[in-house]
Image (cartoon, grey):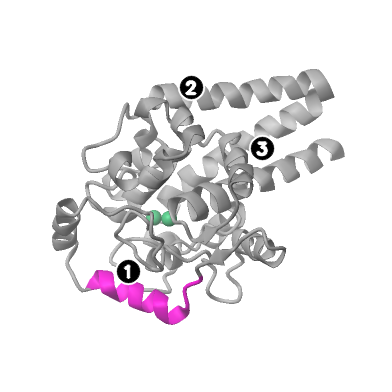
Amino acid sequence: MVEFLVIFFVCYIWHSLGVTVGYHRLLSHRSFSCPKAVEYFWILAGYLAFEGSPIWWATMHRGHHRYVDTPLDPHSPRYGIEHARAGWIRKVGYSEAIDPHIHSKDLIKDPVYRFLEQGGVFRRSHFMCFSIGLTLRFLILLTFGWVPALASLLAGFAVLQIPLMLNVACHLPKLGYRNYQTDDDSTNVWWVALLATGEGWHNNHHACPGSAKTGMRFWEFDLAWLTILFMKTVRLVSRVNVGTHEQHIRGALRRMEVSPATRLEALLDDRKETSETPALCVSSGSGA
Ligand SMILES: [Zn+2]
Ligand SMILES: [Zn+2]
């Protein structure tokens, strides 16, 4: 039992950081730079937690920031809790407003990510991800026995649930508190932050999406940020964007200056932004 719990815990942390450090802060937001081997290490951790195609994940997430809590947001709970949790991943392809060829040009250049994307056919890329994840656990079963295989599989499935839950819980203001007056429903939820290794400080994140650090108050524990900081200390990371408190306030204010309807119109007219130039606290571009 102890062996199972230790393996489960180690796998859970690795897979969860794969989502937070790899899929989210690195690929979706380009909040830091690192060698390709380090990038693949974290993306592998997320992929084996059944997170799906990295291009799909990052493009949908950029779409979330771009159209947050509007009808074009892929998973806003304003338009249905179950849709925001898991309904949106059952779509067959991208919507007209969210296009990886426009919003994720930087990721499409990578041949590995292109292969995992399976031409943008969601069912194929999801199937491939699940097949690879299950095959790996089968190989662990054959090589090391059922305890590590089951612990690894359950950790992967557990981590899969976290971002789905976060999409709902961290956009229901009554469940948390807000440090910044953003024009969306984003909120900070402490228990999501613990389960998601730092990702629950979601109101902070929406105020300054380009920041690699989302815990702003001393009690806002952010394991993903500590991991990035550690990689910076041992020189695995070369550039890190960190938004100050003032930059978070300014980021939130900038979005408040225009009404959501005007912003949405402007965004629809301006679909040519890419994430290739990382920008700190830009929340409406694809780099956010
Ligand atoms: Zn959000
Ligand atoms: Zn984000």
Could you tell me which quadrant the N terminus lies in? top right
Q: Quadrant of residue 208?
A: bottom left
Mark positioned earlier in the residue sequence (3 or 2): 2
**Label 3 is placed on what type of residue?**
Ala
Point out residue 60 in the picture as x, y percentages from the top left corner. 36, 43
Circles 1, 3 touching at the beta carbon (< 8 Å): no
Q: Name the residue under label 1.
A: 182
Mark positioned earlier in the residue sequence (1 or 3): 3
| Mark 3 secondary-structure assignment | helix
Q: Is residue 117 visible?
A: yes
Please state which of the two labelled residues, at mark 3 or mark 2, is closer to the viewer: 2
Magenta-drawn segment: 242-256
Q: Distance between the residues labelled 2 and 1?
A: 37 Å
Q: Distance between the residues labelled 1 and 3?
A: 34 Å
196 relative to 256, above or below: above
> Relative to 98, is 8 on the left or the right?
right
Could you tell me which quadrant the C terminus lies in? bottom left
Q: Mark 2 points at which residue?
A: 127
Q: Name the residue under label 3.
A: 155
Point out residue 206 in the picture as x, y percentages from the top left corner. 39, 63
Query: Which class describes the residues within 10 Å of circle 2: few (<14), some (14-19), or many (20+)?
Result: few
Q: Which mark is residue 137?
A: none
Point out residue 81 in the picture as x, y percentages from the top left corner. 35, 43
| Mark 1 secondary-structure assignment | loop
Query: Which class describes the residues within 10 Å of circle 1: few (<14), some (14-19), or many (20+)?
Result: many
> Relative to 140, is 104 on the left or the right?
left
**Label 2 is placed on what type of residue?**
Phe
